[in-house]
Image: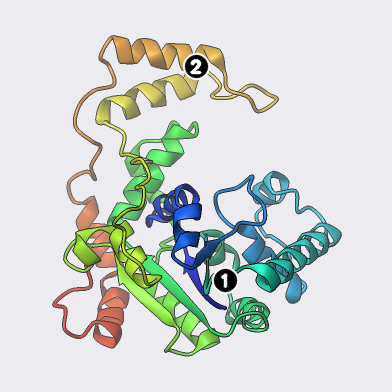
Amino acid sequence: MDAVIHIGLPKCGSTSIQGFLALNAEGLAARGIRYAPCDTRFTSQIELGIAALDAVGAGVANAHARRVFQLETPDDMRQRAATFAAFLDAGIAQWPEALYVASSEHLAVWLDTPEKIAALDTFLTARFASVRYVVYLRPQSEIVLSNYSESVHRGSTESFEAYLGHQSGGHNHRALVRRWEKALGGDRLSIRLLTPDFLTDSDLIADYCAQIGTSVQGLTRPPRLNSAMTDGEIRVRRVLNRVLALRKSGGGSNLLYRGALKLAHLLRLTGGAPHELPRGHRAAIEAHYAESNERLRARYFPDRKTLF
């Protein structure tokens, strides 16, 4: 059995790919492709990252993620890694499909050194005849804009200018690619660009299907998720975030907040064009990554005039 692992960078189509896999598990199985998440509570297959971190004696750095995924102690990591290993070994022994596929944006976030990436690859190559990896890269300006919208959606009151002011520039695609290639070598990582002129049929799902050796025809497409908020909705949410809690202390939705947002929709206060980068900010972000993007283009995409 072979494997194709999607390294899902946040805001680079990961939710769509994971939604596609979940919707089409049976259809893909009929085509000889096994999608089998171990922990179905989460759309991202965090078990892959857990196995790698546990192998090098590391934990999850982010405290919020440790709480959400219940990975507070080394024993938690060890038990979850062992559970995944047992699940995968039992599955491989009985799955009739020729290909195993998985997707997790936590691989890009958690596996921040070649040593951690190599640990994942060792874990997988011990079980599969061959392992390939695919990663989708999106223009950094679009990632920053999407991240800002999500921050407002999660309760932030910041303006875009304030948000941009404390960004650390952590979207260096070349650095990420070099990390993975240092661990894997250059022939098992497929680098894809999230631009219509690059993707198969100008479409992410069609392109991903091509990467796993099948066609999107006859399979169900996921609904469009994480659509960009409008200027009006961002204005309304920033005001609401100042005066109301998005969630109750126990973590559940605040019905008062939801009611106020619904009223704003009814009053048509949340309309307008999709939120776009303020004038000059796109150029500034592109300039920040220009050198690393050009070096990535020259190395991997010499036939393209620009990376994106």
Quadrant (top left/top right/bottom left/bottom right) for the N terminus: bottom right
Judging depth in this view, the residue of 44 and 153 nearest the camera is 44
Q: Is residue 241 above or below residue 199?
A: above
Instruction: Reply above or below: 203 against 297.
Output: above
**Which of the two residues, 9 or 243, is positioned nearer the viewer here?**
9
- Residue 205, position as x, y percentages in the image: 33, 57
| Quadrant into which the C terminus falls | bottom left
State the image quarter where residue 261 is shown.
Answer: top left
Residue 117 in the image: above or below residue 86: below
In the image, residue 132 lies at what x, y percent? 48, 79
Residue denoted by label 2: 257
Q: Amino acid at mark 1?
A: Asp
Q: Residues within 10 Å of mark 1 (few under 14, many from 20)?
A: few
Left or right: 77, with 298 as reference point: right
- Residue 117 percent coordinates (x, y): 59, 77
Amino acid bearing label 2: Tyr
- Determine the image quadrant of residue 93: bottom right
Q: Position of residue 60 (x, y in %)?
A: 69, 60
Residue ranking furthest to the left: 305
Q: Please indicate, yes or no, whether residue 58 appears anywhere in the rendered image.
A: no
Which quadrant holds residue 126? bottom right
Ranked by sequence position, the earlier of labels 1 and 2 is 1
Element under disc 1 = loop
State whether residue 244 appears in this view: yes
Residue at left offset 61%, top offset 80%:
128
Label 2 Cα crowd, 10 Å radius (few <14 / some 14-19 / many 20+): some
Determine whether the residue tagged by mark 2 lies in a helix, strand or loop: helix
> Gap in Å between the C-alphas at discs 1 and 2?
37 Å
Residue 112 marker = 1
